[in-house]
Each structure stands twice: as structure tokens, then as C-alpha cells.
Amino acid sequence: MGYQLSERSKKNREGIDPRLIAISDLAIIITLVDFGHGKYAGKRTAELQHELFLDEKSKADGYDKLSEHQSGNALDFYAYVDGATSWKHEHLAMVAAAHLQAASILGHKVKWGGLWKSKRSKIYGWDMPHIQLLED
């Protein structure tokens, strides 16, 4: 495939745990679907997290309920298919598979938001573009 992360995607990972950066770096090499890391993909302040909560883009408000992004233990991604950003579940699942495989190869435990079930709708996959570290 030969994909590589853009400088913008790399910058958007600043402040993230080095293990997640290593996972992302390996995932881009082994992925079958190109991906990147968007503007809010990495470390977040409480204020930014709260803005995302108010915009209904996160379930964590940044103050009473913290996000793993605030500690640098989470990283979001998007798929990049046919020259455009894709949020299709099948594309995000392929990108997540590369991250999960990379984590396994590197010996790090992670969890993927695509396996989380929404309390309201009882549907899995409400946070498809999210990966976070578990303690090794």
C-alpha cells in the first residue's frame, strides 16, 4: 500500500502517549485503508473537551467526566478513501483493525470505540474512530 501520515496528522498527535504514536506509526504501514488524525484527535484541554461535549461530539464533559484524550491516552482517526475523508463504518473498521494489529505486534493493550455499546440505543460502534490505551 505504501501509505504515510501527513505532517498535519503527526502534529495532531502531539501530547499523546508515545505508545499510541508508535501504534499509529505502525498502523499506517500495515493498513489496507489510508487514514489520518484530525484536529481534535489527540490531547485535549478541559475547555476543548467541554466544547466537544456541548456540540454532542463527545460523551465526556471534560470536568465531571474526563476523556482519555485529556490524559493523552486516546487517539482518534478518520479513514481516507478515494481522495476524501470517510466516516463509513467499513472503512473505519479497517483502520481500527490496523491499529489493533499494530498494538498487538508492539505488545500494548488497547480498546476500540467501535466495540462500545451505547446505553441509549443499545447499538455497538458509537465511537468507531477512537482507540485508547489500557494499562500494560
Image (spheres, rainbow, N blue to C red):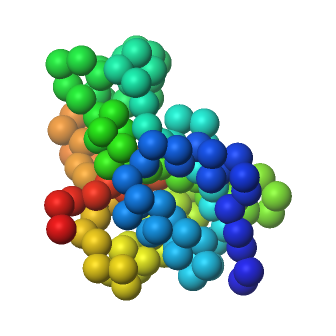
Q: Is residue 86 left or right of residue 108?
A: right
Q: Is residue 63 left or right of residue 99?
A: left
**Figure quadrant of the C terminus:** bottom left
Q: Is residue 105 left or right of residue 121?
A: right
Residue at x-position 60% and y-position 36%:
39
Please, is residue 39 above or below residue 51 in the view? below
Q: Is residue 45 left or right of residue 27?
A: left
Name the residue furthest right.
83
Q: Position of residue 28 (x, y in %)?
A: 60, 71
Q: Is residue 24 visible?
A: yes
**Figure quadrant of the N terminus:** bottom right
Q: Position of residue 114 (x, y in %)?
A: 36, 57
Image quadrant where residue 64 sits: top left
Image quadrant where residue 119 sits: top left
| Count of marks, rendered view | 0
Please, is residue 98 above or below residue 134 in the view? below
Q: Position of residue 95 (x, y in %)?
A: 53, 67
Residue at x-position 53% and y-position 35%:
40
Q: Is residue 53 visible?
A: no
Residue at x-position 82% and y-position 58%:
83
Image quadrant where residue 80 sits: bottom right
Which of the two residues, 130 or 93, is positioned nearer the viewer here?
130
